[in-house]
Image (cartoon, rainbow, N blue to C red):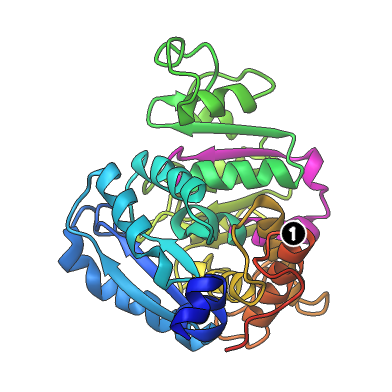
Amino acid sequence: FCMAIAENPEDARRLTIKRNSVAVVTDGSAVLGLGNIGPKAALPVMEGKAALFKRFAGIDAWPICLDTQDSDAIVEIVKAIAPGFAGINLEDISAPRCFEIEARLREALDIPVFHDDQHGTAIVVLAALTNALRVVDKPIENVRVVMSGAGAAGTAILKLLLAAGVKNAVVADIHGVVHAGREDLVDAAPESALRWIADNTNPENLTGTLKEAVRGADVFIGVSAPNVLDGADVAAMADGAIVFALANPDPEVDPAVARRTAAVVATGRSDFPNQINNVLVFPGVFRGLLDAQSRTVNTEMMLAAAQALADVVTEGELNPNYIVPSVFNDKVAGAVAGAVREAAKAAGASAAAGSAAGV
């Protein structure tokens, strides 16, 4: 096998464990609910992630916890270990470093690099929003979406929503509504994430606070901090309001309070209906990428994954308390994988177009 692979490196996918292996890479700098706890303390979380890859998609995932938070070092290490893997799942790396690290690795490697905290969250949110909008009978291009949080998850959610057809999105961070004239953004670097948000959102040029921005909004999506809104804020939203309060463990607004006036409420918690959980996405996404022998992951694949996840919920099942399927629904991973696989082939992203790497 060795000489065959030396002559044709793509045979490594066919002849070795590479074909079904994913590296789960972290530096422990932004572990959900725990913060910057370092690589050793992050290892149990990465082990859990690897177990979920195996349980839901049959993927062999390997926890890689790096004892450095230097972006250059992380990029070089991942590039060095990449030959043994068919995909890289970046996990719990703090913003804004995560943007640069992912971008550099995508440019350098011929395997897909997927920062789950960004894109996994974005895909589940889009799927949930797709179905929530079905519940309230509003087209996505007509709604005003207000987001709280401009970090890794918030930025990725925003970009995917815009790609899906949202025309009017407003983002607020700790300093208030993001707009082009805000004092801290006037001289911001053109390539900065906040500058990009300012240039691509807020068509009405709203200013002020988050509470002011949500008045009359159709959708609120929070990926920020606890208790930034109250019941009065939700009541001031448009009729048929949709509230996704995703901060963990304490959401942006009490879900029980939000339900008094909102039509659909989702959280990141398992003890409330409509849990927005990345495990609905990452196993199927990587299964599809690996089966297609994809060299990359792009927006079209993520949009396909979101639509496939939304479609798992049938018309008969859809209701305000059931907009995303259970994580234990055995149709989820296969549906998402199939959609990603076909999107990868359509994009010509496969290392061996038209073939599938079996497990």
- The verdict on residue 150 being magenta is yes
251 sits left or right of 331 in the view: left
Q: Identify which residue is drawn at 59% across, 62% down.
A: 124
Q: In front here: 332 or 133?
A: 332
Q: Where is residue 18 in the image (x, y as percent from the top left)?
A: 47, 78
Q: Which amino acid does label 1 sit on?
A: Gly
What span is in magenta? Answer: 125-152
Q: For mark 1, does the 10 Å Cα neighbourhood hold few (<14), some (14 to 19), or many (20 or more) residues?
A: some
**In the figure, residue 297 lies in which quadrant?**
bottom right
Residue 223 in view of the camera = no
As displayed, is residue 62 above or below residue 65? below
Q: In front here: 42 or 6?
A: 6
Task: Tell me the residue that label 1 is attached to.
Answer: 348
**In the figure, residue 189 lies in which quadrant?**
top left
Badge 1 element: loop
304 sits left or right of 82 in the view: right
